[in-house]
Amino acid sequence: MALDQETLQSLLQEGLPGATVEIHDVRGDGEHYAARITYSGFAGKNRVQQHQMVYAALNGKMANDLHALQIQTVTP
């Protein structure tokens, strides 16, 4: 089952409170997304830790419902 763009955005915003989340459907197929996430909670974390925070916010959806996600993390 694919994860729609609105659900993906909601999961990230709920899991990373106060984050600004921009989602783009890269191929227009509902399976390949790019996310730009600006979040103050990324401060002091390396890129791997930031991405782990994003995956945690997805509550296991990355392995099951989401095929591909390109992640760009930004600290304001």
Image (cartoon, helix red, strand yellow):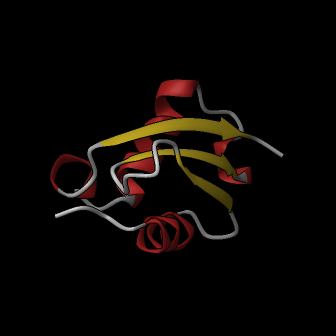
**Could you tell whether 3 is left or right of 44 in the image?**
left
Please state the total of marks drawn on the protein image: 0
Q: Residue 67 or 12: which is nearer the viewer? A: 67
What residue lies at 46% left-to-right and 42% top-to-bottom?
A: 27
Quarter occupied by residue 72: top right
What residue lies at 16% left-to-right and 64% top-to-bottom?
A: 1
What percent of the width, then of the height, locates residue 66? 28, 52
Q: Residue 23 or 76: which is nearer the viewer? A: 23
Residue projecting furthest to the right: 76
Residue projecting furthest to the front: 28
What percent of the width, then of the height, locates residue 73? 64, 38
Q: Residue 6 or 30: which is nearer the viewer? A: 30
What percent of the width, then of the height, locates residue 20? 72, 61
What residue lies at 56% left-to-right and 63% top-to-bottom?
A: 16
In the image, residue 21 above or below residue 47: below
**Could you tell whether 68 is left or right of 22 in the image?**
left
What percent of the width, then of the height, locates residue 44? 68, 33
What residue lies at 72% left-to-right and 39% top-to-bottom?
A: 74
In the image, residue 75 above or below residue 5: above
